[in-house]
């Protein structure tokens, strides 16, 4: 058994904890969605005009988020089961592990929509004693938990107040996350002046953190003193990273890894809706009301990011012909990213298949347009299975009012921007079609990702 603590499993018609050894899909297994994806493109009058500013901002963030991706991939090689002795620190001061009567909880997620795009999914958690509720962006592409604190003078969103918590412990360790940034003073100063976007700076703290009935005492998190002003434009207060702690900038175990050490079934699952309020993350469980069986399991490459091997991209244009682009990519499944990003050479081949596509260069990033009337079937192959992207998610809107050209949702990662040319990032554009299960290793320590057709496909 992967973990020394493992609760009695239970099942219901709604929330299910899967077997520790589910059968793998047979060779050649392919998923067919209940809803046909040979869809007619929307008429132009129903399409918004694409606002590329949020896309540009996301791309800049990805440059910093994945700046050391190769090094972090290597950190996750040969990582075994979670070491509970490394998670529970200062054991003499820690009470007996808290085991809730039911070790599952579903966190509802709100959908932040900007420019017609589902930009972020965020939900509530509690921190401190008595508990203070804040909201967090749920991000499988990073591994740190952080919030702004009451010391953040320029923060407009809700802040954690350490002085109001009887269980808060402050440390002498600093905490920083930078996506795109410049500093007018060295990082060693106590209060650097932050410019640019995606920057947070503060100190590491510990306190009780809970989601519903799932609680971790003395959880490490970053308490931000300074945030770049762009965070004030977003609805969430902080961020909950759900990748492996091998990529955590804090170097500390994640909230979910601590839950596993306390007996939670080592998996969580996510449903991401389109412009709806029924998105959710299910800790320790699978919400069968959000899936259209079956589940296809794909092994994770290393215990760093939730990364899987992408074998091919299949494109069918106007039902005329199907072309397959062979790939050998490391694809990171990232709920904290909105769109799909592939190496620039792969993206160039992809749009070359679509007649009328145009490469658009901006000062900071680039994208492609295609004729809005094009009928497309786009599939990504992981292992023996193909997974479709909904055309409504791929089409980001018209380039300008009444234009016949639209912006495509597959964007390039250039080598000049520092991205490895075997890296793919599969964001919410892909995940809205697929209920996603993230398994830390209930099957003998082998981490894996599961995909099941989402109920979005039946709408």
Image (cartoon, helix red, strand yellow):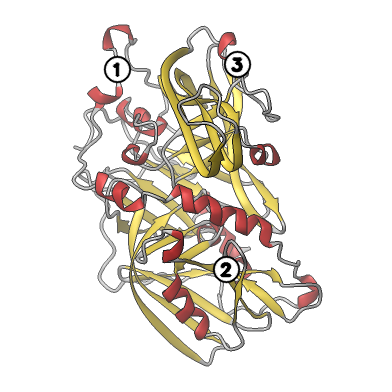
Give the Cα distance between marks 1 and 3.
24 Å
- Between 192 and 233, which is closer to the camera in this rendering? 192
Q: Secondary structure at mark 1?
A: loop
Q: Residues within 10 Å of mark 1 (few under 14, many from 20)?
A: few
Residue at image location 62% in from the left, 52% down from the top: 119
Q: Which residue is mark 1?
A: 89
Farthest residue in the front direction? 185
Q: Dot 2: within a 10 Å radius of its alpha carbon, few (fewer than 14), some, or many (20 or more) residues?
A: some
N-terminal-most mark, 3 or 2:
3
Cα distance, mark 3 to mark 2?
Answer: 41 Å
The reply to whether residue 274 is in sight is no
Height in image: 25 above or below 40?
Answer: above
Asked if the residues shown at circle 1 and circle 3 are in contact, with their CB atoms under 8 angstroms apart, the answer is no
Q: Position of residue 421 (x, y in %)?
A: 37, 66
Q: Give the quarter of the image for residue 244.
A: top left
Q: Is residue 300 visible?
A: yes
Question: With respect to residue 151, does 448 lie above or below?
Answer: below
Q: Which mark is residue 161?
A: 3
Residue 366, numbered circle: 2
């Amino acid at each position: 058994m992967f973990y020394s603590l493992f609760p009695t499993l239970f099942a219901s018609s709604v929330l299910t904890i899967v077997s520790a050894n589910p059968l793998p899909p047979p060779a050649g297994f392919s998923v067919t969605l209940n809803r046909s994806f040979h869809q007619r493109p929307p008429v132009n009058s129903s399409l918004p005009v694409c606002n590329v500013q949020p896309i540009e901002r996301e791309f800049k963030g990805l440059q910093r988020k994945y700046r050391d991706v190769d090094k972090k991939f290597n950190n996750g090689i040969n990582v075994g089961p979670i070491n509970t002795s490394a998670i529970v620190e200062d054991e003499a001061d820690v009470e007996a592990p808290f085991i809730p009567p039911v070790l599952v909880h579903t966190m509802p997620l709100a959908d932040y929509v900007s420019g017609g795009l589902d930009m972020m999914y965020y939900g509530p958690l509690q921190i401190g004693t008595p508990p203070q509720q804040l909201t967090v962006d749920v991000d499988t592409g990073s591994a740190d938990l952080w919030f702004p604190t009451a010391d953040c003078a320029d923060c407009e969103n809700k802040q954690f107040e350490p002085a109001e918590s009887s269980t808060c412990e402050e440390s002498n360790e600093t905490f920083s996350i930078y996506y795109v940034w410049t500093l007018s003073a060295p990082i060693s100063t106590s209060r650097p002046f932050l410019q640019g976007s995606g920057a947070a700076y503060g100190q590491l703290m510990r306190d009780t953190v809970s989601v519903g009935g799932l609680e971790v005492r003395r959880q490490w998190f970053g308490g931000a003193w300074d945030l770049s002003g762009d965070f004030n434009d977003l609805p969430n207060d902080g961020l909950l990273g759900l990748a492996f702690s091998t990529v955590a900038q804090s170097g500390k175990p994640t909230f979910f890894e601590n839950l596993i050490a306390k007996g939670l079934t080592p998996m969580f699952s996510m449903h991401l809706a389109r412009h709806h309020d029924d998105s959710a993350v299910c800790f320790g469980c699978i919400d069968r009301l959000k899936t259209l069986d079956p589940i296809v399991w794909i092994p994770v490459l290393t215990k760093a990011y939730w990364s899987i091997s992408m074998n091919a991209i299949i494109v069918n244009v106007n039902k005329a012909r199907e072309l397959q682009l062979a790939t050998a990519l490391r694809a990171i499944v990232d709920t904290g990213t909105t769109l799909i990003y592939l190496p620039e050479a792969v993206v160039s081949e992809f749009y070359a298949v679509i007649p009328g596509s145009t490469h658009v260069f901006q000062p900071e990033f680039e994208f492609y347009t295609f004729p809005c009337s094009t009928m497309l079937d786009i599939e990504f192959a992981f292992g023996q299975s193909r997974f479709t992207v909904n055309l409504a998610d791929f089409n980001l809107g018209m380039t300008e009012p009444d234009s016949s050209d639209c912006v495509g949702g597959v964007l390039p990662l250039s080598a000049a921007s520092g991205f490895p040319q075997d890296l793919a990032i599969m964001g919410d554009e892909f995940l809205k079609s697929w209920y996603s299960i993230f398994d830390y290793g209930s099957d003998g320590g082998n981490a894996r990702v599961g995909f099941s057709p989402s109920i979005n496909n039946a709408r």
